[in-house]
Image (spheres, rainbow, N blue to C red):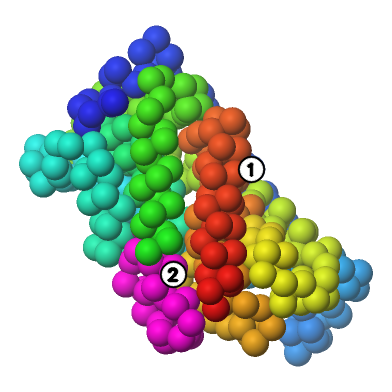
């Protein structure tokens, strides 16, 4: 077990100077998407500029990618801002004093802190990174990472507005999110070498953050710039992949599977992974399919999509190794499957 102490033990000999970020990746990628969307828009006709004729499939892919990016970007920025506040402006002794010493209780309390920080899964990535930079273990940070997108007031309110208390969908999402997050945290806590689950570059970044040079404002600006350059390129790539997958997703087949207790769960888990929609609005998206799919399948969609999707994995790859992400994705998928299937059987 790694307790919440300064992260020098997490980084060891891997601490080194940060590698220069490829700063041109993000602006080029965003500019390319915006230009393709703009020059293919009918709005240009209003000013006498003929729109660029693009294949419909490409236009759809760009539109979907941009919609996911625009929806996610504010939450990522908010998450980076909150992460910077936690890292630099909140005294560590206050955090250590509030949290209990017992590992299980610490993780349980961390999984509930999303109530105080209503950001979606994208914003929780920089927040969880900030927790690890302050000395929290990987297992504690992952518990927060998985639970916070579900156990926050915005997600709870929107899910209630969409479904109310019908068929136990809201209760299943809240309880299921809490259980999955704490199970994942407990399993990761059993691993001796938690720093081995992090990428070498992030370990080096953690070492760099403990070199407290300059004023708090200077360090805040530097941290914001470093986190932005690390996360936004990954967000662009994840959104582009999500848009590309969506235009080829066999939605007719998904709807055809909706009445089967287990296949409907698998279908909506796959849809949640592909669609990459924000946890604060995903309930309204899936509401349109609630008449076709069983309640347990809806819960599985709301659980898995808030914890793991294409966009989320691209962001997490900046922090965790590929093996760790595969382990987490399989674990969350299996738990969502069991919860969804069980609810379908009793529905």
Residue 315 lies within the magenta run: no
Residue range (magenta):
147-174
Q: Position of residue 183 (x, y in %)?
A: 40, 45
Residue 100, quarter of the rendered image: top left
Q: Residue at x 43, y 52 (%)?
A: 180
Q: Which residue is mark 1?
A: 25
Residue 291, quarter of the rendered image: bottom right
Callout 2: 10 Å neighbours few (<14), some, many (20+)?
Answer: many
Q: Which residue is mark 2?
A: 172
In terms of secondary structure, where does tag 1 sit? helix
Up-down: is 279 above or below 87? below
Rounded to the nearest angstrom, the CA distance separating label 2 from label 1 is 40 Å
Mark nearest the camera among 2 and 1 is 2
In terms of secondary structure, where does tag 2 sit? helix
Q: Residue at x 80, y 65 (%)?
A: 249
Q: Residue at x 28, y 44 (%)?
A: 107
Q: Residue at x 54, y 33 (%)?
A: 324
Q: Quadrant of the C terminus?
A: bottom right
Q: Residue furthest bottom?
A: 46
Q: Quadrant of the N terminus?
A: top left
- Relative to the observer, which residue lies in front, 231 or 265? 265
- Relative to the observer, which residue lies in front, 45 or 138? 138
| Relative side of 306 to 266, left or right | left
| Relative side of 126 to 277, left or right | left
Sequence-first disc among 2 and 1: 1
Q: Residue furthest top?
A: 13
Q: Is residue 324 visible?
A: yes
Up-down: is 253 above or below 336? below
Q: Position of residue 171 (x, y in %)?
A: 39, 73
């Amino acid at each position: 077990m790694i307790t919440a102490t300064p992260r020098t033990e997490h980084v060891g000999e891997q601490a080194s100077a940060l590698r220069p970020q490829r700063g041109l990746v993000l602006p080029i990628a965003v500019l390319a998407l915006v230009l393709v969307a703009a020059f293919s828009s009918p709005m240009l006709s209003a000013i006498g500029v003929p729109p660029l004729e693009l294949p419909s499939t490409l236009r759809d892919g760009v539109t979907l990618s941009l919609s996911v990016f625009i929806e996610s970007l504010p939450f990522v920025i908010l998450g980076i801002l909150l992460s910077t506040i936690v890292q630099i402006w909140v005294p560590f002794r206050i955090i250590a004093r509030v949290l209990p010493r017992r590992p299980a209780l610490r993780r349980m309390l961390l999984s509930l802190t999303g109530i105080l920080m209503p950001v979606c899964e994208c914003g929780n990535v920089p927040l969880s990174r900030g927790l690890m930079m302050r000395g929290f273990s990987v297992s504690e940070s992952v518990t927060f990472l998985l639970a916070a997108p579900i156990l926050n007031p915005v997600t709870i309110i929107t899910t209630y507005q969409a479904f109310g208390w019908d068929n136990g969908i809201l209760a299943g999402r809240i309880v299921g999110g809490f259980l999955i997050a704490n199970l994942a945290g407990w399993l990761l806590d059993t691993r001796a070498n938690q720093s081995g689950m992090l990428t070498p570059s992030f370990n080096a970044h953690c070492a760099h953050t403990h070199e407290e040079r300059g004023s708090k404002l200077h360090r805040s600006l530097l941290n914001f710039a470093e986190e932005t350059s690390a996360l936004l390129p990954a967000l662009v790539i994840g959104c582009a992949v999500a848009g590309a997958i969506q235009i080829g997703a066999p939605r007719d087949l998904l709807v055809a599977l909706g009445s089967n207790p287990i296949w409907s769960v698998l279908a909506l888990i796959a849809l949640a992974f592909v669609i990459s929609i924000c946890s604060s609005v995903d309930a309204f998206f899936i509401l349109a399919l609630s008449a076709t799919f069983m309640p347990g399948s809806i819960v599985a969609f709301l659980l898995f999509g808030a914890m793991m999707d294409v966009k989320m994995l691209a962001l997490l790859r900046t922090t965790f190794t590929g093996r760790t992400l595969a382990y987490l994705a399989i674990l969350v998928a299996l738990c969502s499957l069991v919860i969804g299937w069980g609810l379908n059987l009793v529905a």
